[in-house]
Image: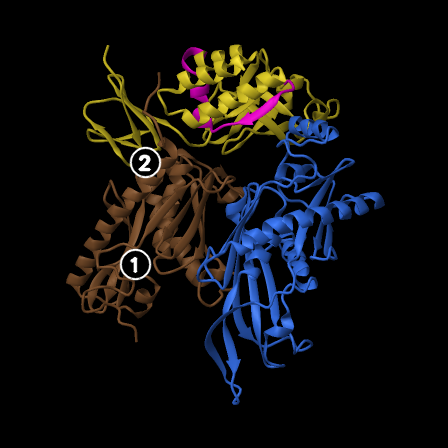
Chain colours: A brown, B blue, C yellow
Amino acid sequence: MVELINEKGLRIDGRGVDELRPLRIEVGVLKNADGSSYIEMGKNKIVAAVYGPKEVHPKHLALPDRSVLRCRYHMAPFSVDVRKPPQPSRREIEISKVIREALEPALILEEYPRTAINIYLEVLQADGGSRCAGITASAVALADAGISMRDMVVACAAGKVAGQVVIDLDDTEDKEGDADLPIAIMPNLNQVTLLQLDGIMAPEEFEKAFNMAVSACHRIYEVQRGALIDKYFGKGEAGEE
Amino acid sequence: MMSAVKRSMVVERLRKDQMVELLSKEKRLDNRGLLDFRDIIIETGVIERASGSAKVQVGNTQVIAGVKIETGEPFPDTPDKGLLVVNAEVLPLASAYAEPGPPDEDAIELARVVDRGIRESKMIDLSKLVLIPGRKVHAVFVDVNVLNVDGNLFDATSYATVASIATAKMPKLSVDQNGQIKRTEEIIPLPIKSIPISVTLARIGDVLLVDPTSEEEAVMDARITLVFDEEDNVCAGQKGQPGTLNFDQVKLAANIAKVKAREVRKILLEGITKDAKG
Amino acid sequence: MSEVKRKYVTPGELIATGNYRPISNVIKVNDNFYAIKIGLAEISHEGIRVIPLSGPYIPKVDDLVIGKVVDYSAFSWEVDINSCFFAYLPAQSVFGRNFSPDRESLPERFSIGDLIYAKVVTYDRTRNPILSISGHGLGRVPKGEMIKIGPAKVPRLIGKKGSMIKTIESATNCRLIIGQNGIILIVGPPDGVLLATQAIRMVESEAHLASLMKDIQSLLSGSREV
């Protein structure tokens, strides 16, 4: 049985309870997509692509006053320890839905009636928190595609491991821990767009975990912003003559 | 699923005319010669959780392959051989024309042709993957995902498959007297006997060209893929598209591909051996 | 002369607070102005706007676009204008009111793959854009080099009162046919086309920089000295 938190308060990978895993975001990694990004969050490696707004096929699925948002979260067969067959599982279908619902409030879909905006996430390697990393990457890809957004969306999980509240659980902590609470927020509007709980927590633990996750989200938002600024504004002074 | 009519890229007449004019001078839209490959970039060991992995770029075509090695029962007609399964998917990420869903006939053809090249060249000595004959063998799964389409998926997928297999590592398993399978401390590579190299050509009018882009594929009349081993033996081939090749063109294509395979082999071997992750 | 304040913004960021007029790509909540796209925010006495650096082409009536014929029916051509929707060019607007499908053959006039320079005559949120080629210079495009840039960068390529495009045209001896939808055709001598292509790519990558015109001028004059 692995010691999830040792006597110095350090986790299996040496992190403190409030520490994020190493995080890296790259913007515009795929040439064909309208917008794209790549994220590494701990050992998670995920590619996000946005296609759209574009015409909806079949036409009867189009909405007259707004765009239809579609999201596909898929794990590559080699992304997990035991090879996963390529067909979408029930878990992937549920995650696709919650990710879509986490991103939708941030998008100004009324600006693109009768179209569809498609978000594709491919998890190349998974290590706990892949849906959160996927949401974070999707928001960057949507901004890269130039889709009008009220705000970015950023996600992080908190949880309870060995009786302590921690953030950004990896796969082992997720499996062996007591609770996993992924959340997504719009960081400027301070609205929650995703919240799931798997496990058991006392009310004060829930509140503490929620607060820690929100604060972690704001830290991740700075990395999102930085990645977008790097790609779009790399050098020089802003302006027009 | 029959899919003879798919929504596909329409090449601008202007671009097509430019292409044909350049081809008559043995040049292409991206300034390549007829027999030039685009830049081939090979990175291995990109997915630590997989037994082996490779990300390959051929120009803008981007592909990632992962190897998972498991144990299972052999096929009844080959009780003394391990299993090899090659699967390919063109992800909806990869192109505006790729739809989510199970692999269509193009993706299945892609996987099967790449598989043929690996199998017929005997890249992996499947007889060395047996643990208990007739009962337990190693099963090597290679899954390839196309991340960005810009032509020549056959070669890019093949290079990623080969590079990920060649750099794959697994814990050595041993069988004790009671027929129990145990993991040892030793980490070993797959038993590799050959490195097959795939070369794809397209025919546009009377001209044969190597490594077509998406635009060239949208205009091409026929395509041919040939796979070679180190001794210049051809171990797999596939002609694609409804157009034809005349006999001279087939022979010319084979000669061109043989020479290009030697060049690409150097690039692939360099990409494989620079994986220092062990 | 009141000054214009500029800053780089990403979606959701607060640009400014105050009594301003929202111009474009901003959301006003009470007296706070937020960006809805990644781009360059400009705050002046006229109001607040964000010049986006990315985004799809959304057609506007009177826009001139370069479109690619991708299909046709008995009554119209379907044209890809690099937007969320395909556009239609009605056969009637090309052949006249007395058009009849038995008499005229659509593919003989424009076939699949042809590029046309057309004007958007109708576009509302309930149907696809309708194009017309009646007008000076419209119709099938001349032979030239085709380039695609992000539609958000087109205004910068045209420049204030056409200053950028005129600069490039005179230095390269080429004519630039620019579609609002991000498709550009360069017509001219081969070395001019090459230089114009480099200039256009530079506009695309430096659209947000104050130094763009200067950099373009160095690029264009630097080549002449060679």
Q: Is residue B24 left or right of residue B171?
A: right
Q: Label 1: few (<14), some or many (≥20) within 10 Å?
A: few
The residue sitting at 60% across, 18% down in the picture is C191
Residue A23 is one of the magenta-drawn residues: no
Residue at mark 2: chain: C
Position of the N terminus of chain C by quadrant = top left
- Residue that mark 1 sits on: A196
Residue C19 spot, x, y in % from top left:
19, 23
Between A45 and A132, the one lying in front of the other is A45
Regarding mark 1 in the picture, which secondary structure is present there? loop
Q: Where is C23 relative to C86, above or below? A: above
The residue sitting at 40% across, 13% down in the picture is C160
Residue B47 spot, x, y in % from top left:
46, 57
What residue type is disc 1 on? Answer: Gln
Residue C155 is one of the magenta-drawn residues: yes
- Residue that mark 2 sits on: C11
Regarding mark 2 in the picture, which secondary structure is present there? loop
- Looking at the rendered structure, the number of numbered marks drawn on it comes to 2
Residue B40 spot, x, y in % from top left:
58, 45
The residue sitting at 28% across, 68% down in the picture is A177
Q: Is residue A130 left or right of residue C226?
A: left
The residue sitting at 64% across, 58% down in the picture is B195
Q: Is residue A237 left or right of residue C170?
A: left
Residue B92 is at least partly visible in this image? yes
Q: Where is B230 relative to C2, above or below? A: below
Q: Which residues are magenta?
A: C142-162
